Amino acid sequence: MQMNPISKLALVVLILLCSVIVSFGELDFDHCERIVKKWVDASSSSEEQHNNKDKRSLQDLLFFLHVPRTGGRTYYNCFLRKLYDNAEECPRSYDKLRFNPRKEKCKLLATHDDYSLMEMLPRDKTSVMTIVRDPVARVLSTYEFSVEVAARFLVHPNLTSAARMASRIRKKNVISTLDIWPWKYLVPWMREDLFARRDARKVKGMVIIEDDNPYDMEEMLMPLHTYLDTPTAHDIIHNGATFQIAGLTNNSHLPEAHEVRHCVQKYKSLGELVLQVAKTRLDSMLYVGLTEEHRESASLFANVVGSQVLSQVVASNLTAKNKNTKSEERDTVSESGSDKSDIQNGTSEVASDKIEAKSGNMTVKTLMEIYEGCSTHLRKSQGTRRVNSLKRISPANFTTETRTRVPREVIQQIKTLNNLDVELYKYAKEIFVKEHELVSKKIIVSTSKRSIVDLQKVFGEMDDEKLWTVALMLLLFFLFFLFVHARRKRTSKVKI
């Protein structure tokens, strides 16, 4: 069968068009590969330049790189704010950087900012800590929190009224969830969707919802499977931990971040390069916690970070005491001046546990006790707030039990979309196990040394007569033990 000239021409044009598309695709991949590799080389070079410090030693500034929905709020409120004074904390920067990091003499910076912030910090004097969570749990928690916060606005009659209220809060210079990355993108998006669905229900009239799966209540809220496949989720949520630790989020301080991230999202094979950078950065951190290993992670933090902060407090107090002693020899400072300074610094209102930390009386054990009490209270208050928020979209409710209703194919979809985070989480677990073993050995050695020292103190305080008495009692006990053991042997032989 012969083709007519028009068909032949159309076939030639189609072949040429396919060739052009393939060529453009190859050119685009080559371009992306160059862009990503250039960023990797620059990142690796920067890491090598500042890799001479001991990663296990707490530096002058502690940068808490807070990956959203990993339990970081608990660490911030129940650990870090107990260890550091308000004056030692850098200006609040969860929404944006509010200070010059190279000039400010603060010791703690907690933020949702990504690793690119390190370019603005004194790297040689900065320690980094973070917490990593199982990617499936993190994505589910992100979805749930987006819905929870957005649902709070349903008290308003319409979206316009809700948006107006949110803008009034901003004018009062109060940092709200709507100002903080990534919620400043996720919450307004979810809020708009909730209002649209509520309006649709009003038009329909009475709506009966029979499904008990809150992740698939289309009449009430955006279903999880729909949420996962939106451009917003692809840009912000999926592989979010890897991009944040690599410094490539849409909140990055690097001008090339958007292009690198876009290339990795488009060509999955390039993701391995970014993953290796994220792993290297985890390796260099002072502390890497795991959300799922809550108790062990808290203990590791207290022994790795908390112990060093407390040691610095003791050293600082000794230095201050020496300075005060020398100044008292020269002149006398009036008590009224001292009191005035205390009031100005707000020390009269500092919580008792923070006072204990700054006085040098707090130990790792008491720090853990304070943390446990604080975290329990915080979880209760957060739980109550969630229940009150979700009442507005009842019967939708998120609990540990309802998560079991998420279909397997959706769980697999999350794992596939977060393939880099899955690998990063595995690597974080390896780091955690090694650090936990190392700290456990140190604790055992330290406890043994203390026991020996305590025994030496006890015996050192005894006079010769008491020492001889103790030695004689031990000898008599040993002889008694041998006598009992010998009698048991004879008895057993007689029975046979």
Image: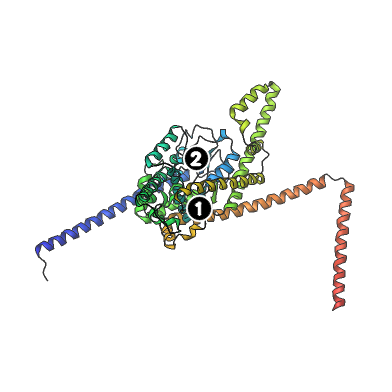
Q: Which residue carries the number 2 mark?
A: 123
Q: Nearer the viewer, residue 391 or 244?
A: 391
Q: What percent of the width, then of the height, locates residue 407?
A: 44, 61
Q: What percent of the width, then of the height, locates residue 125?
A: 53, 39
For the C terminus, the image quarter is: bottom right
Marker disc for residue 348: none
Q: What percent of the width, then of the height, locates residue 412?
A: 43, 61
Q: Nearer the viewer, residue 162 or 445?
A: 162
Q: Which residue type carries mark 1?
A: Arg
Residue extending farthest bottom: 496
User: How far, Cα to Cα, is label 2 from label 1?
Assistant: 26 Å
Q: Residue at x 46, y 32 (%)?
A: 172
Number of numbered discs overlaid on the protein picture: 2
Q: Residue at x 60, y 48 (%)?
A: 376
On the question of residue 377 being in view, the answer is yes
Q: Residue at x 44, y 62 (%)?
A: 408
Residue extending farthest front: 206
Q: What percent of the width, then of the height, locates residue 89?
A: 54, 36
Task: Choose top left, top right, bottom left or bottom right for residue 79.
Answer: top right
Q: Which residue carries the number 1 mark?
A: 133
